[in-house]
Amino acid sequence: MKHVLLRHRDVPDIHKLEVYRKNGGYEAWQQVLKMQPADVIDVVKASGLRGRGGAGFPTGIKWSFIPKGAEEVYVVINTDESETGTFKDRELLERNPHQVIEGALIAAYAVGAKAIYNYWRGEYMDAAHECQAAVKEAYEAGLIGENILESGFSCDFYNHFGAGAYICGEETALLNSLMGYLGQPWSKPPFPAIEGLYAKPTVVNNTETMANIPPIIVNGADWYRQIGTERSPGPKIACLSGHVNKPGNYEVPLGITYRELIFGEAYGGGIPGGKAFKALLPSGGSGPIMIDEHLDVPMTFEGPETVGSVMGSASLIVMDETVNMVWATTKAIHFFHHESCGKCTPCREGTYWMEQLLHRIMEGHGTERDVRVLENVAENIGGKTLCALGEFARNPVLSSIKHFPEDYRALVQPSAEIPLAVAAD
Amino acid sequence: MSDLVSINVDGVDIEVPAGTTVVDAAMRADIQIPVFCHHPKLEPVGMCRMCLVRIGMPVRDRATGELLKEPDGSVQYNWGRTLQTGCTVRVAPGMHVVTNSAEAKDARDDIIEFLLTSHPLDCPICDKGGECPLQNLTMAHGGGTSRFNFNDKLTNDKSVPLGELIYLDRERCIQCARCTRFQSEIADDPVIAFHNRGRHLEIVTMSDPGFDSYWSGNTTDICPVGALTTADFRFGARPWELTPAATLSPHDAAGENITVSTRREAKSGGRVVVKRIMPRQNEWVNEIWISDRTRFVHHFAEAADRLKMPLVRKNGQLTPTTWDEALTLVAEKLAATGEQAAGLAGDRLSNEDLFMFQKLFRKALNKNNNIDLANKRLAGGDVTADVGIASGSNLGDLGKGDTIVVIATDLHEEVPIWWLRVKQASERGARLIVLNVRETRLDKHASFVMHYAPGQAIAVAGNLLEHDEEVATAVRDADNLVIFYGYEGLSYDETDALARTLGNLLLETEHVGRPNNGLIAVWPRNNTQGVWDMAVHPGLTPGYRADRNPGLDANAIYAGAESGDITALYIVGADPVGDGLMPGRGALDFMVVQELFLTETAQLADVVLPAQSWLERDGTFTNGERRVQRYNPAIQKVGDSRPDWQILAQVIEKITEGSEKTPFAASLVFSKEIAKSVRAYKDMDYRTLGQVVEQFPKVGGDDLYYGGTSYANEAGIGQQWSASAESKKPKKPFDVPELDVTRPAGLVLLRVAALYTPGTLNQYSELLHARMAKPTVMLHYADADQLGIADGMSLVLRVNGTELPATASIQDGVPSGVALLRGFAWRKGLESAEIVKVQTPITA
């Protein structure tokens, strides 16, 4: 299959403007500059493109929320890519940066923005050189800047680095960080489409989402809808890591099964050493764990929901039979505790508490009651947090207790003080 | 006013203004949704998650807009996926809120449990213990035991000074951001902020000195736990040991309402002593805020060197004596002196004191009108009596469509709460016009700023409708117009002309006689307005009636004392010698001083009478908005001191040989004498001044917004008296005297105010010493060059033979041709001082 997103795998040196243009690059951009912004939004709407950052919100609809005639609008590319096991945006911007830049320019034109901010995860500093070089080339070619290609439309592009915080992948925290404030989310409303960057209407899209835009414009919404499923159209980059023979990024049509992705020869190629599969984190640390019997669901925005999980950013972390799920959960919760911004109580305190309990269990000092308390703490975080980070933090705990109670049981002592049956309150 | 929205909370239908949050709306129906981070004076953030409630909205048909009905005919509601934070959701028509369901209660229990996992639970040694929202809500929502392993608690610093005034206990902090939001949203001093993240999210200060703000103490009040404490109160007492006393700030013309918390304690020799000062809610005056000066400058009242006994000069020495001997001597001498007696009073005194003072001269001394305010800086009390801000006004109501003019004053340094309320009015959309010789803090909130040349204030005020079309429109067409004027860079006579000019502007643009319109004098003291109202004035009698036989004014009295035309002088609550107004006793035969301390003036007196401070007694002050407010005793009297009004009444009683009896209480001076003589006060007595009304936001109660007992105003909001323009008859314009306002050639010296200016009262609050304004001469670089003065150079100001040390500071904001004198107590002649260089430049 020819890649739609990871085109550098088919076309060497596509990060260079000359090569990118020779292969159809910026054709969409030139086409768009002759269209009405509303028509651009209509095409994206018709394509059914959904946000690739994980939430899956329809991109065209998101753009249409920007108030018509707003004076000052911003487009922000979310390259915070901090979800554990996610490394797709990095590859895109390192190897095929022009496609993201072109997508963002189209977004800016569609919503009337005069500036694009690409918010990078701080740790990606070294990965940004290619992107910065691409931006420079595009400026020199008149594709970005004042009066682009004599169309009368002007737009600037800025690469900006965060300071290394998971929470800044959350759009409002990202915007706060971009404005120089502490990277904490705000309570919505106001939504960024109404009051975002500098309190102006703002579109925030994931890097991979942006990369989808130019092919949609060039090939049309109908072409795009041929890829993927009815409700989850298009290609998706899956980030495969953990216990698989061939880890890495794979561009796949949405709808492929998880089993195919992990075991298929074109993809993960199975578990090393012929060991048995134990668990899959389908969306980095933040999605509920999937087990063997779940693997035949299609990887779409809806598919994993039928088995109580999510597709998210499609970062698949595979674990074989040697992994103790309490250990894995402890790792995940350590991450969430470390990354909790501290703004809202349940997340700030709950992640800390869960980590303390998990450490105690891992060290062999835990009791059955500790497991019940752990489960209850995770439940109590639910539905109370300001943003989704707190909700994510519950998933590893609740799903590991649900699917792998024996891993916990092997580590804890019977609870002396309170019988198990009544401990959960 | 704003539109009302009907909602239903727990089955109760209520109507609240549009834009109200669900939490505040429920509060109006006395349904208390618990909160930590929410504060009705701050923007919502939804951080603590304590206020989770179920919110339902009526469902409408998308096509027709019709309300959809359930099968049983009732309205269909969309109750949302999860609970929502009541503090971030604003009311909408038809909204239903459920706060008392099992799920909402469970959610609160869970949040309390989460909060307590990191809280040190050190209530037994915590200053907030006993009036702590966290403690109270734990009692209401918390479990009896902890599921959290105590040894897993994160430990953190427990005594972090954010500067020398405020201390932070990082373990107790629940990261609600009330303090940081107060500092950025209300005080506009964003000098504290969160640092780090997660469980390590901690408050840090980013200023030097730490927590550099005149409002820092307010953060300790709104802190919902014991994380922020003041150096003044920290570990000083437990809240339940404290007795609250409702009183007023004695420091500035706004009359901030405060509660003084006292305790009788062994370590103070069994005396009742002041432990802390907190704001008392008065939405018309100070809302729920006070400046740090009001909070921390009270130690003078309990100072060891307070006068405790009457003193009489014997053999050249001031010697302790009995009250009877001292009063008899004063009465005899005054009675014998007759017309050659004169009196000077200060403007910190209460209305009762001031009334008795003028009564002593007018009644007991047979129509002697030789009385005046000792230190006259700002004129115009007669103008504010006519066109002052009308009764029923509230600066908190000013906003879009309204205009505020501020001229010749620096509100941030002089009356900070007015600065705060004017700033907020501008944030609500009021147009603000700031006129002064130099930059002030208010400039940045103004829509028009003008820096005029020294002496041009009257001309600028007179031409305000001609100067600039935009300004003219803002003034002429304002829905409401309020004008603040002060005395910065102006002589007393010039302030008189300024007041009259501004009065005419208000009359011409018809902004008089209705609420939220009129003139406000930025009086130098808390009760300068009362000095006018009680007619401590040579040419007026109480009630602003002109006297046909005016007496000598202050200047004439000082001259008379020097020349011998005045032979006996009675000074109450003033230090004219210290202020440079009076070189010494002059040719006086007899001099009485009634004071708290042995001031420079008192040291020269024949009789010194120990007065009580405002904390030991009751009385009334009238603020710059002409609101008469009561204050109550907080501590026992110091030594054998007496209230000023009582001393004066006792002198009157002796002179009149008992025909004028000393009233039993200040309240009787007010109701039997003031209310009868001063027309504007005729409907007032201590009972009406003590009337309480419901205020929003509601405070007190069950500690949802504020801990403790201090905030609730149970002692009255006072009464604003009607300016004469409020009665229907049209006013004639004021005559404006023609003045020569030209300044002598050369550098113009101009004293500017500083909140913490070294002075008698401030110096007793040791914790403010490091923040006292350093005596500084601020110069434009060109002037400094010309004078050969370098930045940081030591200078001396020579004022009538006195030498005052100062440091030179060369600053961008100083207008050329002007030297700004900051950090100097007011002193006659200061602005005509000679600047002398000391030839050793200060090096860092």
Image (cartoon, grey):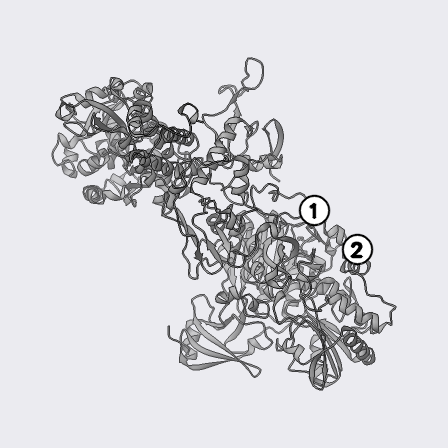
Confirm whether circles 2 and 1 share one chain: yes
- What's the amino acid at mark 1? Val
Q: Determine the residue located farthest toward the top in the rendered image.
A: B71
Q: Badge 2 local density, few (<14 within 10 Å), some, or many (20+)?
A: some
Number of callouts in the render? Answer: 2
Q: Badge 1 local density, few (<14 within 10 Å), some, or many (20+)?
A: some
Quadrant including the C terminus of chain B: bottom left
The picture places residue A282, in percent across and down from the top left corner, at 27, 26
- What's the amino acid at mark 2? Lys
Whether B619 is drawn above or below A243: the answer is: below
- Which of pointers 2 and 1 indicates the residue nearer the eye? 1
| Residue where numbered disc 2 is placed | B682
Residue B537 as seen in the image, left or right of residue B820: right
The picture places residue B821, in percent across and down from the top left corner, at 51, 72
Residue B810 as seen in the image, left or right of residue B562: left
Question: Given the image, what chain letter belongs to the residue carrying mark 2?
Answer: B
The picture places residue A336, in percent across and down from the top left corner, at 33, 37
* Residue B772 in sight from this viewpoint: yes
| Residue where numbered disc 1 is placed | B692
Q: Report helix, strand or loop for mark 2.
A: loop
Quadrant including the N terminus of chain B: top right
Question: Given the image, what chain letter belongs to the residue carrying mark 1?
Answer: B
The picture places residue B389, in percent across and down from the top left corner, at 67, 55
